[in-house]
Amino acid sequence: MRIIIEKDYQTLSKKAALILASQITLKPNSNLGLATGGTPLAMYKNLIKMYKKDEIDFSKVQTFNLDEYCGLSESNPNSYHYYMNHNFFNQINIKKDRINIPNGNAKNLNKECREYENSIKKAGGIDLQVLGIGSNGHIGFNEPAKNLNVNTEIVKLTKETITANSRFFESKADVPKRAISMGIATILKSNRIILLASGKNKAEAIKKTVSGKISTQIPASLLQTHPNITMLLDQEAASLIKEEDLETDFNCDSAK
């Protein structure tokens, strides 16, 4: 695991965009796993700027989003379909038939999960997966639990996640209680992973993620088992990491 600590959110986001751009440059038909939420927004803005300067071409890229709420239409402003189209896809030259996001409004959600998982396999797997992290250590919508889902499944959101996500809705009651999410094994099969975290509210989750103790109560801690993961943190998110928390094979770069 490589840990890169940048001075602030904007610097972190530029670094993340450069990593994605490098991946696409090296492999124009890359399969990218993408995340939503507040943290990746500036990364997407930087990628759009690079595209408008003709520095990057998305025409051969295929994308797979981590998750989607159950019960929201694609046009609902709080759906992740809307988020991705509004904040990224509509402003670049990606082909619409190469965009994959779970359909949380499908009549048969279990079938949708199976088909989504199979679509990732048929594409040859994910080359680079982008992750955020919840304050409780969830990745995707894989919430802390005794047992975690292996593949893409329907998940029940915790009260903590519902409360955290309520800032995007008119009220807490409007937040969906379930979602479709890639499972832990699906995420870990990615060739490369980058995790973005910003702010003091993520510091405790980051500390537990890199502490060396792997637990399903901190789903992100399972990322320690991946051979090629980079954590991009701002100084606030990294503020609780201590030298003794890190195993000897961790590589930590701190921005000046």
Image: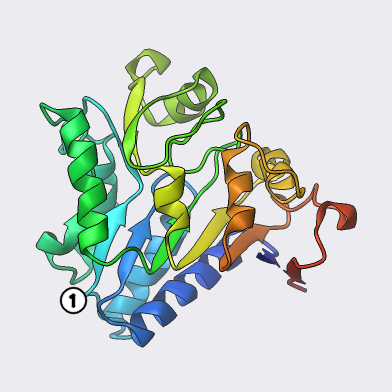
Query: Residue at 22% across / 47% down in the picture?
Result: 116
Q: Name the amino acid, label 1.
A: Ser
Graded by Cα atoms within 10 Å as few (under 14), some (14 to 19) or many (20 or more), the crowding at tag 1 reads some
Where residue 254 appears, x then y in whole percent? 76, 70
Query: In the visual, does 109 lie left or right of 244?
Result: left
Query: Residue at 43% across / 81% down in the picture?
Result: 22
- Residue 217 in view (yes/no): yes
Query: In the visual, does 204 lie left or right of 59?
Result: right
Q: How many marks?
A: 1
At mark 1, the secondary structure is loop
Residue 181 occupies quadrant: top left
Q: Quadrant of the C terminus?
A: bottom right
- Residue 101 in view (yes/no): no
Residue 218 occupies quadrant: top right
Query: In the visual, does 181 lie left or right of 233?
Result: left
| Depicted 216 relative to depicted 239: above or below | above
| Depicted 23 relative to depicted 193: above or below | below
Query: Residue at 68% across / 43% down in the picture?
Result: 214
Q: Residue furthest top?
A: 173
Q: Nearer the viewer, residue 246 or 189?
A: 189
| Depicted 167 relative to depicted 124: above or below | above
Query: Residue at 34% across / 79% down in the picture?
Result: 24
Where residue 248 appears, x then y in whole percent? 82, 66
Where residue 126 appears, x then y in whole percent? 35, 64
Which residue does the numbered mark 1 point to in the structure image? 59
Where residue 1 appears, x then y in whole percent? 66, 64
